[in-house]
Amino acid sequence: MMRFRTRAFGSVRGRASAARWGETPVEFAAAAHRAPRARLAAGVLALLAAAVVGEAKGGTDPLTELKRLENAFQEVVREVGPSVVGVRVRRRCVDDTGGSEEQRARLFEQLVIVNGSGTIIHSDGLILTNEHVVHDAFSIEITFHDGQSEVGKIVASDARSDLAIVRVPRTGLTAARFCDFSRVERGQWTVALGNPFGLGGDGQSSVSVGVISNLHRRLPGLGESDDRLYDDMIQTTADINPGNSGGPLLNLDGELVGVVTAMHTRSGGDEGVGFALPLDHLRRRMIERLCAGRPIEYGYVGLTVRSAEAGVAVDDVEPTGPAARAGVRPGDLIVRFDEMPVRDSTELSRLVGRTPAGSRVPLELMRDGESLRTELVVARRTPARAAALRGSAILWRGARLAERTRKSSGSEGGGLDLTVIGVLADTPAERAGLTRGDVVTHVDGDPVADLITMRSRLLAARGAIVLRIARRGDVVIQP
């Protein structure tokens, strides 16, 4: 069975990059294969030629029609090219693969280089890009259309929306225009400009074209460990490569439609399925706040949830959070939030996030087959609160798992294990025979990594998962 993988793209260099971006079901920047892209390009060209010939039956020369379309693409590049920048980020990174303390101290000073893209949105030096491109930046270098570079400084950034604003000490820049997003539809042409693989050192951005394949796409699992939410994405056939992250997705009027962010692939190579953050009314408001140096505020209720057949199942409740104060318990099924039906966990996250802090919201639950109503007061989401739910334990399929060193968990060797610290009744974990005190050493044959990586992997899984339990062997946990 082939596993889908989604990648958020900033082209990364440096020996520590693999440790930072881990080979998990949710993968970040890596080089793309070229063969599938060539086949895709040939297919698009054939379809385009066929379409033009069909339109040309009235006597118009097909080559003339192709030239008109070509001119439209070139005009977009001429108009918007000066607004696109290369973003080169240096990060300090620890290589923790071993060695003496002195060796590790020297390795700490090594820099990992990340290449991304950005778009000038204000003539006074404000640049829009992805937060994951500039995350943990030690330094930021912005390369302009004329090949000159400036040092950039982060004005504000927001991990959950994956948006960031960088300022450079330049004025009189050419700013890109935003589109009327209410007029964006499937099938419209798109043009992606950017700095793939960091090739745009001369300031000349690369160009790829495609169409909008779909809107409102959700990418579950991607960015979960970093508290990102990709729940309303544009899907496009425009060619996306490492280093394109943060660059513009444009329409044929040269207007900003989205921010290029990720690629979805079965093989690990580019198969013509790219994703961009839509620059709709909501994100335009977010960008305005970030340009002013103000944080984005989200609602928070203190729940860890997962999608279920008839609503959203509650896996964990923060003991002192809003949901706990409203009487919500693990095992409850949320069916309505603020009188809105809730169909899956992504929808609930979006509804909660957009609810102002302090709002009193009715909540409809199912518990043991009975319908219950309660009211909770939405709190303001903070990084500390988000980390609290991702922190020292996770609840997955009814098993509460905590990170333990192998010395403390009683396993042989060094490294980490996951210890079962509790099992809920009538859950997949209980039915599989997991008990308190079990020590998980492998997941689907792979050694346990850190808790955050395992959380992303386990919560993204849709089928059966094999856990290797110390001194007991393999146990299969069904969905």
Image: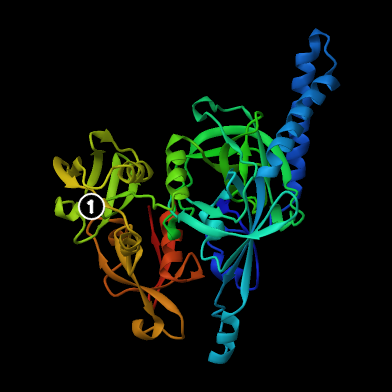
Residue nearest the observer in this picture, 261 or 469:
261
Say which of 103 and 219 sits in front: 103
Above or below 2: residue 335: above
Residue that label 1 marks = 331
Q: Residue furthest top?
A: 58
Of residue 29 and residue 408, the one placed in the foreground of this image is: 29
Residue at image coords 44%, 71%: 450
In the rendered image, the vertical position of residue 166 relative to residue 184, given as above or below? below
The image quadrant of residue 451 is bottom left
Q: Residue furthest front?
A: 171
Residue at (37, 52) in percent of width and height: 479
| Picture coordinates of residue 182, whole percent (x, y) | 49, 27
Q: Residue 22's x, y, as percent?
A: 55, 66
* Left or right: 329 in relation to 288: left
- Res. 26 in view: no
The answer to which image quadrant residue 91 occupies is bottom right
Q: Name which residue type carries label 1.
A: Gly
